[in-house]
Structure formats: C-alpha cells, structure tokens
Amino acid sequence: MLGVVRWFGAATAALLAASGAFAADFDFGPQQPGRPHVQADARAIALLPEGAKFVRDGVFTVAIVPFAPPIATYATDAQTPVGADADIASLVADSLGRKLDLQPIAWADWPLGLTSGKYDAVISNVGVTEARKEKFDFSTYRLGLHGFYVRDDSAIKQIREPQDAAGLTIITGSGTNQERILLEWSRRDVAAGLQPISPQYYDDQTAVILALLSGCADAIFNPNGPLAYEAAKHGRIRLVGTVNAGWPLRSDVGIATRKGAGLAPALTQAINDLISGGSYAVALKRWSLDEEALPKSETNPPGLPKY
C-alpha cells in the first residue's frame, strides 16, 4: 500500500467517527449526500471486451481496505466504507452503468480475492509496481505521494529535494518505502558535504503528531493522504513538499484488475473522462487530496521496480 503505516485500525476509525472526533468539514456519514455522481460513459462501456465477466450482472464489485481517512475508513455506522477511494469507486461504477458493491477487506486479502474472481477490481491505494503488473492490470487514478509536513509555525518553507532536508530530524515509518527514500537522501547529502538526515520512528499516528508539535522533530515524511487529512482537520501542521512514492521513478496508485480480464482499458477511459468532466477533481477536493490529482490516467504504466 505504498508503504502506508496503518495508523487507524477499522475498529478505531469507526469509534472515532462515532464519537464525533472527525472534523465537521468531512462527512463520515454512511449516506454520503455530497458524493459526486455521473451518467454512464458510452466511450468507456464500448471498451469493455465482448462477454466481459463481472462477479454479478449489472454490478461493479470492488474491494476496499478501510485503513485510514481520508483515503478509506468506516463511516459512523461502523460498517460502510467512505473516503476518496470509495468516491472514485462510485464514479467508476456510474461510468460503467453499474451498481456499486463496495466490499471492505483486509489488505492481505486483496491479491488472492482478485485473482480468484471474488472481486471485479480493487480500489484501495494500491501502488503500481513491476512485480504486481505480472499478475494484475492497472488503471491509474491518483498520484502516489509521500508528503513532508511541519508545524504550522515552523520556519521551514520547502522540502522537495535532498539538500532541503539536510541536518533535519524527520519522522518516518520504519521499514517503509518512505524510509528508503529518506535514507538515500541522507546518503546523498553526506556525499555532498552536507549534514545527514536523522530519521525518527514512532508506533502510531498520535505519537507522530505529538512528537512534531512538541518539537522533538522538524518534520514528518509519510504517505500524504492521512497527513493531508490531519492538516485539514486541525490546522496544526502544513505541507512543505511532496515526493512520488517511487522516487526517483514513479509509482502511482491504480485500480487493480485481473491480468488479461480486459477491464483496464475501459476503466482508464472512465477515469480520463471523469478527469475531463470535473467530477474527479470534486471527489479528491472533498477529501483534501487535491495535491494527488493525476492529469491523465494510464493503463499499466511503468511502476516501482523490483529491488
């Protein structure tokens, strides 16, 4: 999941939502009246292969992992997945002229469930990698970004390349892709005669935010989505730079479908028409993920290489 640390478990997210701990500006109710909808997209439907097999007639069955807001979490009823990925799944189902069946699952279950035909697609922050492309087809729908966030009163204005982070203490996730990037940046800084980056590690999101706000670290470098939510929710932290999860290459987020099922071209067309029609931007903006908007969807683009 692009190195995403599971800062919120399903039960925790549901309890937070039910207690009203989420920001009033975010709608975590199960009904989602503000979710954008579109009419069926004839161009996308025309690209579906003849006799295309779906789990159920007239239905688009999508697996989703409710791991953290604003990308995907449980609604206040503790059972309905909501968030940016749920909105994208809904828009794609509309585009295909099908009813959406959104099925919450555990992250570890999606590859087998998809290959066995349990779902038509997985829309759940799945990063495109060369290894995954051997078994699945992808239609990209969001930039895979890690974000640098600082305290709102920090003097730091920008962190976008290695020298910007030299000498800083930066919180990140141990064993994650973002840690790999940070360590390589530190190596490059030292080679250039600059101060190394000092990584700092914590077990959960609450500890991460408290450490930053108390001055124990200069910045956080982790997946952008949950941090963008935190920034929008409380206004105590702000974004000062993003880096693609595949740095120095790219690893964007894609809708995963079974290899050779033939659905990817239609899904890519649907996303591109949603982009040009404006509903795509609406879906991302309502979850404060404008920064992760793609200019164009692609089918099976180059992904994160095997290391």
Image: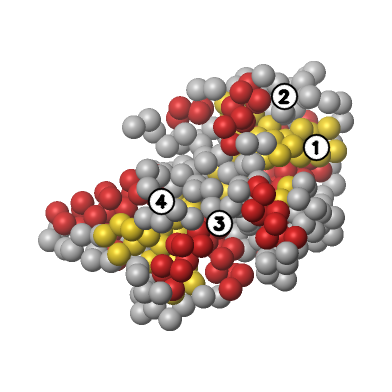
Dot 1 or dot 3: first in sequence order is 1
What separation in Å lies between label 3 and label 2 (alpha carbons)? 28 Å
Q: Which residue is mark 2?
A: 118
Q: Position of residue 6 (x, y in %)?
A: 53, 48
Residue displayed at 46% across by 69% down? 210
Badge 3 marks a residue whose secondary structure is helix
Q: In the rendered view, does 211 fall on the left or right side of 19?
A: left
Mark 4 or 2, nearer chain start: 2
Total count of labels? 4
| Residue beneath disc 4 | 173
Residue assigned mark 1: 101
Q: Residue at x 39, y 33 (%)?
A: 305
Q: In this view of the protein, which residue sits in the foreground, 290 or 146?
A: 146
Q: At numbered mark 4, what does the secondary structure look like: helix, strand or loop?
A: loop
Q: Is residue 302 left or right of residue 230?
A: left
Element under label 1? strand
Which quarter of the picture shows residue 291? Answer: bottom right
- How many neighbours does mark 1 have within 10 angstroms: few (below 14), some (14-19), or many (20 or more)? some
Q: Kindly identify the amino acid type of the residue bearing the numbered disc 2.
A: Lys
Q: Earlier in the sequence, mark 1 or mark 4?
A: 1
Position of residue 196 measured from the top left corner of the image (x, y, whole percent): 20, 59
**Marks 2/1: CA distance?**
12 Å
